[in-house]
Every structure is written in C-alpha cells, then in structure tokens.
Image: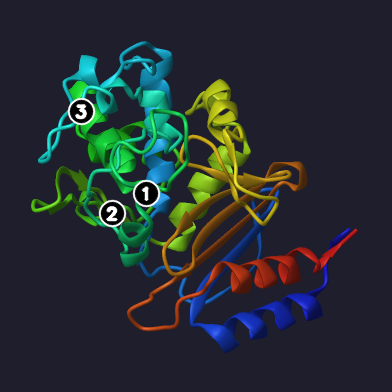
Amino acid sequence: MGWSINKLAKAKKYSQNISRSSVLIIENGVIVYSWGDLKKKYNLYSIRKSILSATYGKYILNKTIDINSTLQKLNINDINNLTDTEREAKISDLLKSRSGVYHPAAYETKKMKEIRPLRGSHKANEYWYYNNWDFNTLLTIFEQETKKSFFKTFKNDIADKIKMQNLKLEDMRYVYDKKSSIHPAYPFRMNILDLARFGLLMENNGKWHNNSIISKQWIQESFKKYTILDNKFCNSYGYMWWSSKDIYCARGFGGQWLVILPKLNIVIVHLVDIKKSNRINTKEFKNLFFKIINSKLL
C-alpha cells in the first residue's frame, strides 16, 4: 500500500501546465503530497455554501431552525416582492436549490443570470436550478432564526474547534448587490490547510479527536442525492454539497475544489487564484483528480 511518487509528480506537472494551483492530498489525516502555496488565502467562491450547510446542522437538529418552515412563515421577501406561490418554498427546498424562486441575487455569474428560469415557471421542489438566491437567503434565515452572526458562529462552532490556524473574521464578509436583492452573499478567504481540516471533519462524520462537532446524521442528510443531474463527476446535489458514487465535493467558481472520499480516507483540496492564473474547468479538474487517485498503489 502507498502512493507512486512518480505518478504524483506527473499529476503535479499536469496541474502546473494548466494553472498555478495549490493542491493538498491527505490520507488517513496525513499529508501525502502537495504543491503550490499552502499558506496563501484564496477566495473559496461557492465552497462557502457547503460551509453554511455544515453550520446549519446543529441548529436544525436542536430545533432552533425548522427545516420545514416556509418563506411565508419566516416573513422572507425581496426587492421584487415574492408571490404567494414562491413563499410556499421551505428551508429544505432552498438547501436543495429547488425553491422555485427565480429572483435576481447577489454574486451571480453571467451564466447564472442567462439560464435563470422565468419567475413562476416552477413551484417549490419541482425543478433544480443552481440558485444564488436560495444560497444567499439561507444566510438571512440562519441569522434571523439563530439571532447570531453566521461568520462568528462558524468560527466558534467549527473553525476554532478543529484548530483552523489562519482563519480570521476579517476573511469573511457580506457582499450586497442592492439593485438585485436584499440578501447578501458571504464569501470566505481561506488557505488550503484550514480548508483541508474542514474536509477531514466531514470525512470523519463530523468528529474531531472523538469530539462530535457536526452531527453524523446531518452530514448524511447533506450528502444525499436529492437531485441527480447526470452520472458525471460530482454532479448530483444534496444540501449544498455535490456528489457522485462514494465522492463528495464542495465546488467553487474557477477551480476551487474540496473532494472527500470517506471509503478511502482521502481528502483532496485544489485552490487557484483566478485573478493571477487560469481558471480550471470541471473536465480539467476531473483529469487531475483521476491522475491523483491513480497514483494510489492498491
């Protein structure tokens, strides 16, 4: 058992030929191989959503937040008033990105705007669309129902308990687009070592040195395939987590990836500064992923 250093070196070369990425490979909690700047803080982009999902778990399970509450009951609205039908969506629908609310949102990409369905075209839980309105509104709901700052809660409930070494509150911020929506995005900056700790926590069913930080039940519910888009790599959707067979992923714009393989006890983290380097598309990352996995000696 072990790894082929020659094959890992080839994976590194492939990665460096397409982008200046930072990559970390961990097996059984031990760093196997890495390249790039491990201390640099990167914008995680949509990995923020998986972090919010993980933070939600405690408060849903202790009944502070009712996952079946509707937008109507929660008194959630937006700049362009929601319809009665839209306000029938539940928190669970938003977690699955199936709210049926197609209102403009902060931090949307050009593609998101182009393919956003027409308002009123689908009811809650009828249709999956990768919807920043859902993801951003979940932040509003979290802070409204818990009466806590999401950023401080994540730091206190999770980051500090797993000894994230470099994450500061100033690395997390609200981003508003007040012409589009009242609900802000919540980008994170984090280095690859701290993100790997979060990945290890999820791989270990929420336990850290035998202390339960996130409920195993919540992780299992979050990783379920509520929407199966196709059989491609990490292309089914849970509660703001992606998955394919025995693989669970948090993904972010431009090539940010946290990949968890519980059966192999492996975590792979890939981060890139898209302002200084090329973006990595899903096909390119998939190629890199399998080059890494095929370096494992069976």
- Residue at 22 percent across and 49 percent down: it is 104
Q: Tell me the residue that label 3 is attached to.
A: 83
22 lies above or below 268: below
Q: Tell me the residue that label 2 is attached to.
A: 187
Q: Quadrant of the C terminus?
A: bottom right
Left or right: 118 in relation to 161:
left
**First-in-chain label (2 vs 1):** 1
Say few, some or many: other residues with alpha carbon within 10 Å of mark 2 (under 14 / 14 to 19 / 20 or more).
some
Find numbered disc 2 in the image and state the secondary structure of the residue it sits on.
loop
**First-in-chain label (3 vs 2):** 3
Find numbered disc 3 in the image and state the secondary structure of the residue it sits on.
loop
Say few, some or many: other residues with alpha carbon within 10 Å of mark 1 (under 14 / 14 to 19 / 20 or more).
many
Give percent across and percent down for residue 163.
Answer: 42, 44
CB atoms of marks 3 and 1 within 8 Å: no
Give percent across and percent down for residue 25.
Answer: 64, 62
Amino acid type at image mark 1:
Arg
Cα–Cα span, label 3 and label 2: 29 Å
Find numbered disc 1 in the image and state the secondary structure of the residue it sits on.
helix
As rendered, which of 279 and 111 lies closer to the eye?
111
CB atoms of marks 2 and 1 within 8 Å: yes
Question: Can I make out residue 279 in this image?
Answer: yes
Examine the image and state in which quarter residue 233 appears.
Answer: bottom right
As rendered, which of 113 and 74 lies closer to the eye?
113
As rendered, which of 10 and 139 lies closer to the eye?
139
- Residue at 48 percent across and 82 percent down: it is 20
Cα–Cα span, label 2 and label 1: 6 Å
136 lies above or below 206: below
Q: Tell me the residue that label 1 is attached to.
A: 48
